[in-house]
Each structure stands twice: as structure tokens, then as C-alpha cells.
Amino acid sequence: MDDFLRLSADTARFTHGAPRALAFGDDGRLLWFLRSTGPVDALESLWVLDTATGTETLLADPRALSPEPGELPVTERRLRERIRLVAAGIGSYALSGDGRSAVFPLYGRLYRVTGDGAGGPAEIPAAGPAFDPRPNADGSRTAYVADDALHVAPGGRISPDDGARWGVAEFAAAEELGRARGHWWSPDGVTLLAARVDESALQRRWFADPAHPELPAEDFAYPEAGGPNADVQLWVLGPDGGRVRLDWDAATHPYVSDAGWESPTEILLTVQDRLQRSVLLLSADPATGRTRELSATTHPQWVDPLVPGTPARLPDGRMLTAADTPGGAARGLALDGKPLTGDGIQVRRVAGIHEGRLLIEAGLRDPAEQQVLLLDPDTGAPTPLADGPGVHSVQASSGTLLLTSADADGFRRTVRTADGRAFVLRDLSAPLPYRVVPVLERVTEHGVPTALVLPRDHVPGRRLPVLMDSYGGPGFQDVSAEPRRWQARQWWADQGFAVVTVDNRGTPYVSPAFTHAMYRGFSEVTLEDQVAALRALGARHGDLDLGRVGVRGWSYGGYLAAMAVLRRPDVFHAAAAGAAPTDFRHYDTAYTERYLGLPQEHPEAYERDCLLPDAPQLTRPLLLVTGLADDNVHPSHTLRLSRALTDAGRPHQLLALPGVTHMTPGGTREKVMAQELAFFRRELAVS
């Protein structure tokens, strides 16, 4: 590997040493976070910053607690895939209700530590390899999962032995609905709300490592489009052994996308119908299990995922919910069902309340940027708190703020206390090797966001082959001012390419109407916008050689890359397609059905978006890449396409990676990039 790829691999794409998983505790006095010791250290430790003094304290070092790294429990390993967590060492922690202590898992063992560090981490006895520990209000008790059962320490098992999984989030919730947890303490720290997950109706998917044929295969339950989902129930488990099931019409609204205690006498939960056109916010009585509807949101296509931080009850009792503005021009907020924001603000997250106003992250101008605003809850009037160029985010507690700003010059994390002091949180990550300012333009009649990165030594008038590098699918924005995502693209440009990234319709943060354009069809809108944007950029930038266009991508981006050369060989001349979902009939329920409907009811949509029938039309070079341990886009997707191409007599290349998951950790991505570079140089005649 060359120097950049080696540095990118060694630093986990420039994230080792950066503070992560930040959370305020003890009414803003403590700022907890995870951070490794430097840019090439993969093991993260637990730290706390005292906002009264600005002093950082190391609370727990995984090297001291476990000199020999162990194996992660299978449940934790799979959840890490769902939430895209690659950190080693202490990968996560949970605060007590008062924020003065934390618990964390480390290779299946549990530890508790206080914010003052007194006595160091103390191990919590567990019934087995433990997962997802959660302390109660004062940290005196910890709930955790072991062997799919919910336990409390001190205490013991509190979930029944009924064959179900207790206290966990099922695949659909963790991967697609934004809910990665399955148990919640009541505010008084006595009672637990727990998910009961029955996966007995689901098909099993299997993995075998061909590099180790002596090892048994792994299997897991997978909700395939059109097939059964897990049966999810919510139960209140009392300290005396009492159990109360929350009662709602789960046959009509089977998905639980959010849950938690609002007070000792009220639980709030958000449920959705299978096609996610109807979302209900329910209030539940933990004593009886009875629920009542607080709000209902419907959409003829689908209701977009919740704005983080909503729903929420304000101190005056009003209910804050997400709500699209009329015509789908903006994602906004509503109070008690009354719109609070208009078309000029694209709300992305509600961070809390600060100085009597709502603290939000939103887009005001270009969708590549994000601002932090204070929003008057009575008038909706916004006041910018951080609105310079770049991506700004915020966390808050009792008047203390953590503001994070990211732009072409890197990241800055500043703590501002309620009494007016400010200090910077240390970042030990490697400096970004490139200062990249991509050319951002909105093109075509749809205002599609695009970015262009040229070689640093580019001489105007020199024609460059084009490398399209986009994701293109729902739920992820590529064209953003966040600086890390342009590092690899600058490297690609310096290899002799004009790198083009396009956020076609269907991607987030332009407007709900822009996102919903993908309804009942991935392929047509994605490919139409990518082609139109490429041609528009070619017309504006004469150095782009549209006679030599390569396309690469991973996951949905891999689907886009393969589809590009299969269906538009007149535009795209070579493709490297990684982890591509080639037939959405074999992808998961919650994602696929949201956009395409049920395959039993709309088989034409699934057939139209399936790449297998296109195999005989391949005339361009195609490199297929898959990780053989990928439990998100199972390797069978790539292998089915490879078989169809082979059956049709169409030459192609296949790179199968034993032991590699969807996240390509440990430098795998960079090693694949080196092979992609050789492929594109050869096929596009790049000197």
C-alpha cells in the first residue's frame, strides 16, 4: 500500500485518538467520552472531563483491565455491525440516571466506575458473557443481557425462560429503525421496561468461513422482504416479579421504533405499521399496560424516520414531534400537532432545551452544511448559535454546551459552560493529510447536490478520466462539508481522476419530497439522476473526459456501480461494486418494504430493481467485491450475480474476502482500494 492508504488503515480513517461517544452527566458538571491514546491506537479508554476545572481524567483503561483482549459476545458483535461500531477496547458505556457513574462491557465482563475515579473500575459479577449493561438512576443496580436473558446485578435473572430473547433490539429495529437497545430503567431505578423478541418464525441465514473449514458455521435470524418479522412485545418487569405487558394493536403497528420512560407513571413508545406509512406516538400506563394515542403521523408513501430528540414532552407539558411542512419542502417540528417551523429550516436533530429555547441542528442553506440554532417554542423564531461554513453539532446539559464544528480545516470541539468559560476538548487523532474543498454544485431541474474533487496538481486544460464515487441510497448523505469523507476521494483524484459524487433523489437532507422520489423504485431514479448530474458537470467542467467514466461504491453504492455498467454502458465504462444488494427480494423487511412495498403485492418493483436479469447485457469491465462474513448484505447477493454472469458467459472479476464484514475494518477497505486502483487504471487507460 502507498503512504496514504497505510496511514488511513493505521488510523482507522483518521478516527483513532478522536474523542467519541460524548455524554454529559451530573447536571453538566461531567463530560464523559471515549478516546484512545493516539492516532494509531485502536483501544479506546473511558475518560471524563470536569467542566468546572477543565481537567480530563482517565477512568478506565482496557489494557489494565484485560491485558489479553478477549472475544466479544456474539450478541454484542452483531449489534456493533448494526450500529457500525468498529472501536476496540471499551466500545460503549452507559450512564446512571444522575450521570455520576457509568457501566461498560469489556469482552463480556462488566465494570462500574464513578465520575471522580475513586477506587477505579469495579467488576460487576455477571451470569455469563454480558451485553448492553444499563445502570439505574443512582447506579446501585445494573441491568444487562446474558444468553438472551435479562439480568439485574445485584439480583439475578428477571426475564422468564420462555424461549424468547429478552432485553435486546431485533435486527430490523437496530439496522433500520434507529432503536439499538431493548431495556430501560424507570426513573426511580426500581422497574424495567423490556423488549421480548420472538424470532422463531424467521428464516436462518448461515455463514461459513472457507478459510477455516474445520470451524462450524454461524447462523442468525433474518427478516427477509415479504417474510415474517420478529414478534416484539414490551413488558414492565417489577422488582417483586410482577409483569405487565403494554397493550397496543401490534398486528397493525408491529414495529417499535422508540420507547422509554417519561415519568414513573408514564411510558412513551412510538410504533409503526409494516410499510411505515402510519406512525403512532403512544402513552402507556406501566401499572396496567393500557395505551392511548398522543399523535398520529401518516404519509401515502412512507413516514421518514424520527428526528432524533423527538418525540419529547416539554417542561410545560406540550408534545414536540417531527412534522413535514405542506408539500414536503422541509422536515420540521410541531408542538401539540401545530407546525413550529417552515420551509426555510430542515430540522435534523433536537438536542434539548437551552436558555428556555429548543436547541436544534438544522440545515438553513446548502444541504452539505449544518447549523446549530436556538428555536423559540412559541414563535418558531430561530437564533443561530453556530452557523459558519461546515457541519456544526451540539450537546447540552444544564446550561453547558459542547459545540463541534467540522470543515475543511478539521474538527474543533469546544465546551462552553453556563458561567461563560470555554475550553477545547483534546483531539489526539492524526491531522487530516489533505485540506479538501470540493466544488459543490446543485445541478439538473431537481437541484441534485454534487461534488467535484480534482487532483491537487491539476493543470486546467488537461482532460481527466472521471471516477463516480457515490452511495446514492436512502438514509445517507454523501455530499457534506464533513472533512473526513473527502480524504479518500482526494487520494483517488491524485491518482489521476476527476472524482464526482452525486446525492441523487432519494438521499436525505434536501427535502422530504426529494427523498420520497425514490418510492416504488430504486433503480430508475438513482441511475437517471447520476447520469444527468454527470452530464451537467461535464458541460460545466470541460476537463472531465466523459469518454472514460468509472464508477465505484459499497453497499447501495455497490448496487449503483453494478447497475451503471449493466444498464448504461454508453455512459459508464468500468465499475467496482462492493457488497451490492443485487436482488432486494433477499434484503431485509423494514428497509426494503418501506420503499418498494411488499413483494407479494408489487412484484414488478422488485423485478425492475433486480440486477440478475441484466447479467447477459454486461459489456463493460466489472469487479465484484464481497465480504464472506457480511451479515447485512449477505455474500449470496454478490455470488448470485456472479453466477448469473457466468451462466450468461459474461467475463467479470470476483474478489471474495474471508472473514470480512460489511464494515471492512482493520485496513480491509484500503487494501481493496489498492486493487480497485489497479483495475481502473487498466480499464480506463489512466497513466
Image (tube, rainbow, N blue to C red):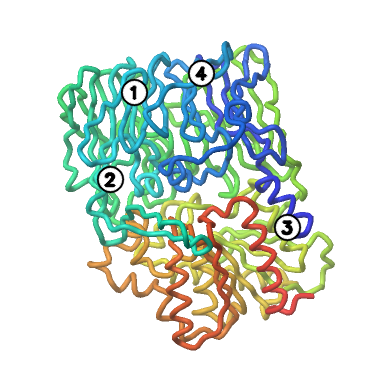
* Residue at 82% from the left image edge and 65% from the top image edge: 458
- SS at circle 3: helix
Please state which of the two labelled residues, at mark 1 or mark 3, is closer to the viewer: 1
Q: Say which residue label 3 marks.
A: 490
Q: Amino acid at mark 4?
A: Ala
Task: Kindly report the distance in space between the C-alpha atoms of the residues bearing marks 3 and 2.
Answer: 41 Å
Give the mark nearer the N terminus: 1 vs 2: 1
Task: Kindly report the distance in space between the C-alpha atoms of the residues bearing marks 3 and 4.
Answer: 46 Å
* Residue at 24% from the left image edge and 41% from the top image edge: 164
Vertical side of 146 occupied by 516: above or below: below
Task: Kindly report the distance in space between the C-alpha atoms of the residues bearing marks 1 and 4.
Answer: 16 Å
| Count of numbered circles on the image | 4
Q: Say which residue label 2 marks.
A: 255
* Residue at 40% from the left image edge and 37% from the top image edge: 333
Q: Say which residue label 4 marks.
A: 122
Please state which of the two labelled residues, at mark 2 or mark 4, is closer to the viewer: 4
Task: Kindly report the distance in space between the C-alpha atoms of the residues bearing marks 2 and 4.
Answer: 37 Å
Q: Say which residue label 1 marks.
A: 152
Q: Nearer the viewer, residue 520 or 121?
A: 121
Q: Amino acid at mark 1?
A: Val
Give the mark nearer the N terminus: 3 vs 4: 4
* Residue at 39% from the left image edge and 32% from the top image edge: 128
